[in-house]
Structures are given as C-alpha cells and as structure tokens.
Image (tube, helix red, strand yellow):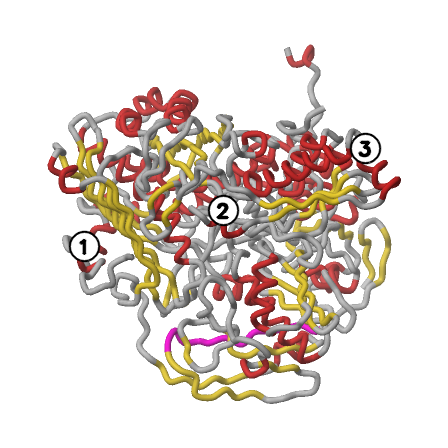
Amino acid sequence: MPVVGQSVRRKDGIGKATGRVQYADDLVFPGMLYGRTIRTTIPCGRIQDVKFQLSPGLTICDFRDIPGKNVVSLIVDDQPCLVEREVRHVAEPVLLLAHEDRDALLAATVEIEYEEVTPLFDPLRSEQVLKELLIEKGNLEKGFASADVIVEGVYRTGHQEHIYIETNGVVAVPEKNGIAVHGSIQCPFYVDRALRVLLGPGRHVRVVQAETGGGFGGKEEYPSMLACHATLLALKSGRPVKIIYDRVEDMLATTKRHPSLVRHKTGVKRDGRITAMDVEVVIDGGAYVTLSPVVLSRGGIHAAGPYRCANTRIRGRAMFTNTPPNGAFRGFGAPQTQFAMEVHMERIAETLGLDPVKVRERNALRPGDFTATGQKLREDCSALTVLREAVKRSGYRRKSKKYKGTNKGIGIALFYHGSGFTGSGELKLASRAAVECTERGVRLLVSSTEIGQGTRTMHAQIVADAMDIPYEQVEVAPVDTAVVPDSGPTVASRTCMVVGKILQRASEELKQKLGGMPPAEYYKRYGPLRVEKEHVPPEWLKWDEDRYRGDAYVTFAWACDVAEVEVDRDTFEVRPLRITAVQDIGRAIHPALATGQIEGGTGQGVGFALIEQVVMKNGAMANAQLTNYTIPTTLDTPDMDVVLLENPFPEGPFGAKGLGELPIDGPAPAIVNAIRSLGIDVREVPATPEVVMLAASNSRPAVERHVDMLTYGAPVAVFPPTARAPA
Amino acid sequence: MRLTLNGAAVDVEAHPMKRLLDVLREECGLTGTKEGCGEGECGACTVLIDDQPVCACLVPWAHVDGRTVTSIEGLADQHPLQQAFMDEVGAQCGICTPGMILAAIALGPNPSLTKIKEGLAGNLCRCTGYEAIYRAIQSTAPVIPRSAAD
C-alpha cells in the first residue's frame, strides 16, 4: 500500500517520546574535557593584550594554534575562527579554554585590553556595502506615468532570535590523524569543509550529526564555528572536548534574522491595478559576510510579492555594521520583504478605498504571468486559489463586518516562497543521494538532517513508494560525512523537493536492478547493491546570476493567511485570536508532518509579529535570556486552522514543493493588517504595545519618523550615487 | 540523599546545592531531562516531584531528600501520552518532549483545552505551534461512545 500521502509513524517518534535519543549534550566520551570560549566585550577596535594564568589541567588555544587558515569558511572567507587583533563585534571569540572540571574551567580568568574604535550600528549610516542587487523589468517611468495614484511607505522588521530549545553544542573527538565532530548541526558538509580549511590538507575529518533540537536556520552556519573551536582544543589536548553554549551565550554570540527596512513606491489605477513598483530593501548584515548575500537575494526576489506588474525595480543592499553577523533564519529574507509588500498592499487598498481582497485578486500572479525576475509561471501557480479559499474558509468578509466598531480586527496576507536554492544554486550544488540493499530491506543515505521537520520519515516514505516496498523496510543511515553522500545543506525548503526527488530516482533505478526481487533477499544472495544519483535541475531552468533575470526558483509554494486579533485599548497589547493558513505545497508526502510545519512556522511568525524583540545596546543583545526575550507560549499562540492544498509540481517527488519556510512569511503581515483594520497605522514588527500605542496616538507612523531622521524623501541617501553600481 | 527515583529507592551522593537537573543527567545517567535555558523559563527540564511538575534546573539536590522524583525514564515507555505523542506527531525536534509529556501527565485525566494551555504555559516548544501537542493530549482522553454522546 502506498505510504506517500499517509501520516505514517515517525521514524524517530519512539526515541523522542521516551527521551532516549542522544543530543550533543548527552554524548560522553572517555577522558572528555569541557570547552569554553572567551569573547570580545567591545564592538569595534583592536586587541592590545590578552592576559591569563596557566593552571594545571587547563588547555588554552588562540589563533596561533590553527594549523591551516584562520577562517570559518563559508561564502567569503572573511570571518576568523579566533580574533587575531581586529575586533568587529561584541562576542567575537578570542581564546579557547578546556578543562576536565567545569568549576575549574569557569574559575579561569582572562583579561583583554583593547584600543577602542567608534563602532557603527546603523545600517543606513554604514558606507560599507556587503552586497547589492538590482532587479529591473519594464519601464518604471512609464509605469508611474500611467498610474492614477502613487502610494509610498516604509516598513521595518526587527531582529529575531531562533530559540531552538536545544542550544548550540558539539563534541570534537581526536581520531586517526584528525578529528571527528559530533554535534547539533543542520549542514554537516558545511562543517566538514570549514574544518578542512581550518586544519589544512592531509587531515582526517568526519562530521556526525547528533540528534538536533531544532535549527530553523540557526544551525546552518554557526556550528562550523563551534566545531572549529572544539577541534582546536581537542587536537591540542589530545582528548575529546565538548562545547555546549548556555542560553545567554547562544543568544549573544550566534546569528539572528536580519533586521530590514523596505521602502515601497507603487503606481496604481483607481481600480487597484498596479502599474509600477519601485522597491528598496536594506538589511543589516552585521560584521561579517556569512550568508547575507544569499539572504538579500531571496529577500529581493520575493520583494514584489506574488503580484504581477510590468514595470518593476527592486534595489537591495546588505550593509556591514558592528554587530554579530545576522544569518539564516527560516524564510531567509522573504519574511522581511513580504511583510513590507503585504502591509503596503493593505495601504494601497486603504488609499483607494477598495476591498483588500479585490486589490489582491486583481494583481495576483496567474499561470502564464511573469515575476519580477521575468520568470514565467506555470500551472503550479496557485495565488488566486489560496486567496479565495482562505477568504472563504476564515469567514473573512462576514467577520470584517462583524468586528467593525469592536476591538477585534481581521487581516489578510497573500504570499509565496521559492523552493530550493535560488537560480543556478542547485546546479552548482550537484547534490547526491543514495539507496542500498540491506539484510532488512533498503537503507537511504543522505546528508539532509533531521532537525524536527521529519526528514527521515518523509524520505523513507518516498523511497518506500518508489521501490514499492513497505515503509518499515526502509531505514535511514545516520548522517556521517564519512558515510553519506553530500546532499547539500538542509535549508531553503529543498530537503523534500530536491533531495527527495534524487532519492525517488535512485530508488526507481534500484528497483529496476532488483528485477522484482525483494531487496533483503537480493542482499542475502548477492551482497551489497547501491545506487547513487545526482540532482538534475529541469532543462528549462534559465538564470542570469549577474542581472537577476530568469527562473529564480523551479517552483513556488503559495499561501494565504487570515489573522484575527483583539487589541486592548488601554494597554495596547495585541492578542492573536485565530489564524487561518491555507497553503499549497504541491503534495503533502506526510500530511501530519506538513501540517506540523505550517503550525510551527505560523507560531514563529506570530512571535516575529508581536513579541519577539531583540534589544541591542552598544552592539550586543541586551535581553539575551529567555526571561527577557520571550517566544510564544501556549497562551500567546492563537488557534490555528491549517488547510493543505495540493497543486502538484510535476518535477517534485510525487508532486511535492518546498514547505519548510513558506509558513513564516505570512503571519506578521496578516496580524499587522488585522491591527490596521482597527484604524491603527502600524508598519513594523514586532508590533509591541509601545509600537501600537505610538501608532494609535500619532498620525504619522513611528517607522516613517525614524527614517525621516536619516533618509526621508531622499532615497539617494540609502543608495548614495557614489556607491558602486550593481553589475 | 535518599529518595524515590522513577519508582525505586535510591541513595545518591552529590553536592546538596547541585542542580537536580545535573544530578539526574550526570550522577544518575538519566539524560532524558534536557536543559533549554537554565532559568526556569522553557520547561525542557520538567520532572515530577511528588507528582508536581517542576523545573529541575531550579531545584537544588538537597530539596528532593525523601521525595519522589519522576523523570521521563520513569514512564518505562508505557505511558499512553508517549504513544499519543508518537501518533499525533506531538514531537518534532523532540528536545521539549520529555518535559512536555511530564507536564501533561500532571494535568490529570481528560483536561479541557483551556486547562491544557494553562498547564503547559511554562513549557516552550519552538517547532509545533503547540497544536499537535494539544491533539496528542486530547487523543488520550477516553472517547465517549457515540450513543452516549448523542
């Protein structure tokens, strides 16, 4: 019986329900030491001196202990593993300590003397451009000339901290002439590569994923840093070294969602049709490049929302500032830019006095339409379907009337999310996956990690159906870079659609080779048989990396959220009551897991919208503990009604598209639009009581005033003419 | 220190001010109890002391002298809630799950949705949006036969 489309039992359900699965902090190796990181306390300057006392049993490493290159290798090798002299942000690692006794380790004192340099925290004042992009289509001037009305606005989103409940942690174990690193890791081959650069050629490197207690992008790049640190200590001491961050260190030192400022200028006809869109995006990259260029790309490409417009310009910039680098977080730039687009869309409807649903319907992308990058959409474009279904399902029209004159509001957001790496990214990755016969059935081998989303289960379902064998006969190899092929990173909503498809093809080939014989029987008779395949992007995919033209993604997933809120007119607290989430994901391989992704992503989106506020003081997170940075509890999370729609993507496994990130794009604009329906002009998130109070008591939104000081009315200040033009 | 741990009388030596969380994980080898924040906010380290849910990161070892402590391992894989969390996908990454299940046990039988939400407000989950956790807990409630419900 086919299992795709069935909510079969999770492969890891039992281990998790019994607490038996082993996370990084549960791992113990003989002779293991504990590691600690000494970090900078200033945002910008130079180290003059480092003073510490040697004590028995203490291992100490600084940059001079690095055998290879002193970088955490990623896109651009600019981030040091350990600071040599130049300090670019608070909480940069300088010195590493290890000891077998944690009390002795914590008792060790280190003093660092600095020469301080004036730091820069405001991305709008920064002159250091990290990455720039330009997307152009049609003729902007002509588009604005044909408009009846021009609507302008500025929108802002704040940092967001991942708050995976398991903090970052690794254990490095000396092995052969090198190292094995076990840890809480989203992308083991990123770590593998970073270690090889750190250690130099000829060293043995192996990375093993421990059970991982949540990632959400937060364990995409930073685990490479931890792995490098633990490795240096392990190699110097000759003993296994465990580094587990406590919550404060994790929040202070590791990446967050990029704060953004987006300015929209849109030309519209009286009937709501968009004639021109001019969008400017600025994100705060922090002190090193890390993943910011790619975040800006995805953010920029999604900045025009799921709408058609013949004349579009999107300009984007990621700026350097003296804060810890911002990084990957579920949605990867798209939640920021689509927040701006969807709140702006609401303001267009308000300005024209039109129904917000009608304005969206009029402009929503249809099959055959072209996106901002000039990508022609196929039949798997479902913007109108999700919009209409969400309006109907939520009772949007009835409730809009019913809530008039009350403290309740209702808001809508239409959004989409590109599946897989941008443009030719998947071609460059050339991901691989394998299946092989075992004495029990079939084993699948991928480097895609299980971080809660159900990778193991979903991949096993695909293999089971492609092989036509029972789901129970499919096992999943532990992710160990010495054993599994490189399936690319577990990011970008690609694990099901891209890696799942490779597995499907490999399984079909294996099935054919078996010629009808059960895999276990084949194994017993003839021994091992393995098929490994590489990802093949569709032939029609064309992408111009320099000009941002063409097929940005092989497909998009489409969704519409309707949020209902209640605003306390005395305290200005916003209570989210209900979110209806209608999401087209192509095909749900495992409906319960897919629903879980949407519910979880929606919950994170609610936090992003209302309560998750990172307070930065002097370049450091001032509220770096869960007491002061709160994520939604059961009582803060609204009721959810999730509807899965299935408009298959013909080239995905069994029709599946990417799903992981889509649900976080919608809640923030839907909630803010619900607040707006009460006549409160909010244009930023988190919409804390302070923000809502200001918006309710002032005629001009706070975010406009903020930008006023710097750039209001002068976009050239955001994009100075002296700056290098994008290629 | 003598206490009843997961149904058995035990005598464990540890510094009286050491956190219960650390004693369970290190001295007793019971790693099913997880640390998420170390300050009683996330509930990942929830255990039952005399059937009441507490954060083991806030409890000094001396406090449990003579008490009855239950960690996830004490359920011996037999509890219907463990089954329900598997069936309803109440666990995604799984790190909050042991604490969540113990907190749910403390709710007693057939809790209403309001009672579940109030009772679990001290247990953070970043993966599920809590909906699947509610479904899991509610699925363990005895189903009223249709004829009786009509």
Looking at the picture, which amino acid does disc 2 mark? Answer: Ala
Q: Earlier in the sequence, mark 1 or mark 3?
A: 3
Q: Nearer the viewer, residue A422 or B55?
A: A422
Where does the C terminus of chain A fall, quadrant-wise?
Answer: bottom left
Indicate the amino acid at tag 1: Pro
Residue B77 sits in which quadrant?
A: top right
Does A324 appear above or below A546?
A: below
Magenta region, residue range: A33-44
Mark 2, secondary structure of its residue: loop
Residue at the (76%, 56%) spot, across then down: B30
CA separation in Å, label 3 and label 2: 35 Å
Q: Which residue is mark 1?
A: A715
Q: Is residue A493 left or right of residue B95?
A: left
Q: Amino acid at mark 3?
A: Pro
Task: Tell us which disc is closer to us: 3 or 2.
Answer: 3
Which residue, given by chain and number where applicable, does mark 2 sit on? A492
Q: Position of residue A665 (x, y in %)?
A: 41, 41
- For mark 1, give the secondary structure: helix
Badge 2, how many Cα within 10 Å: few under 14, some, many 20+? many
Q: Residue at x 78, y 70 (%)?
A: A30
The span from disc 1 to disc 3 (Cα, nearest Å) is: 66 Å
